Image (cartoon, rainbow, N blue to C red):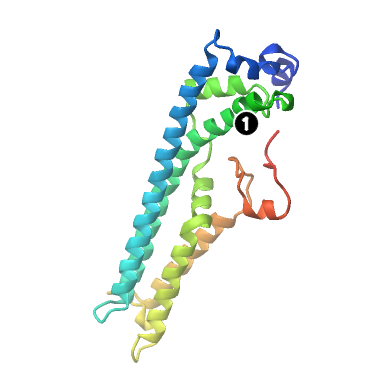
Amino acid sequence: MSTDEAQDFDPEAPEEREIGREMVDQSTGLGSVMAHCYRGEMSRVTTWRQRLDETTKWAVMILAGLLAYGFSTSGTPAVLLAGIVVVAIFLVIEARRYQDYDIYRARVRLLQENLIANALDPSQGVEHRNWRRELSEDFRNPTLKTPYLEALSRRLRRVYLALLFVLLAAWLFRLTTFGGDGTWVSNATIGSVPGYIVIASVGAFYIGILWIAFRPHPRRSKEEFDRKEVQEGKWKDSDRE
């Protein structure tokens, strides 16, 4: 936190100490305004959450169809490689949607942590210093909270890494078990592209997505429902001030 923010924040200031009382004071109208604001932001969060689910649903449906066709009598290993490309495209789309979803999710959590929670129990105070200024600035100038690579990493770990490795396993199984008399390298050949180049390209792609998914980097967005942290007893977000 900067020096200016520390100087501006006064835990005993009326606007911080009495925010719970302002919520129920009919003369200010703050409760009505914030209720409508919260309802609107929750609607946006729900809409973007549904868009994320739709992308995942289409990726799973296409994966299932390509797996069925890839192991049919007319299917080829190249069909499964096409599935990897299609799922990767859905991953790129969903990562961008996650960035938009996280904008509104962050607003809702800011209201829940500092306004609603404090209205229910003012004795605990607010979670974020200068949260009103932060929320006001976000309404004036909306910005992305999560960098694109971090959004890509999140969606990979949550959903797409499993889907892509299912396709990889299916492709390798198709090369080795249903390859006929040829070697698995020769079976990987696509048109005039030698099999070893195809295998090397696939290997480089999977090394790349593993690096994106598990690369060490500082976390920019909050992950409050991290199951690993909960199991270890770390209930609070590590980046919270």
**Residue 20: % across, % down:** 64, 20
Q: Please determine whether, in this image, residue 234 is positioned above or below residue 108.
A: below
Say whether residue 89 is left or right of residue 99. left
Quarter occupied by residue 172? bottom left
Above-or-below relation of 85 to 151: below
Which residue extends farthest top?
Answer: 27
Q: Quadrant of the C terminus?
A: top right
Name the residue: 34% across, 56% down. Answer: 58
Given residues 150 and 52, the one toward you in this image is 52
Residue at x 50%, y 23% (from the top left corner): 35
Q: Which residue is mark 1?
A: 113
Q: Quadrant of the N terminus?
A: top right
User: Quick check: 191 above or below 4?
Assistant: below
* Residue at 58% across, 31% down: 112
Q: Secondary structure at mark 1?
A: helix
How far across and down, in percent of the image, does residue 119 sit? 63, 24
Image-based side of 204 in relation to 216, left or right: left
- Let me know if residue 140 appears in the view: yes
Which quadrant would residue 111 be assigned to in this image? top right
Looking at this rendering, what residue extends furthest in the bottom direction?
181
Task: Give the residue type at disc 1.
Answer: Glu
Please name whichever residue, 125 or 137, is drawn nearer the observer in this view of the structure. Answer: 125
Q: Residue 141, can we see it?
A: no
- Viewer-proximal residue among 40 and 106: 40
Say which residue appears at 62% left-offset and 50% top-offset.
226
Which percent across, then down, holds residue 114?
63, 27
Residue 88 image point, x, y percent: 40, 57
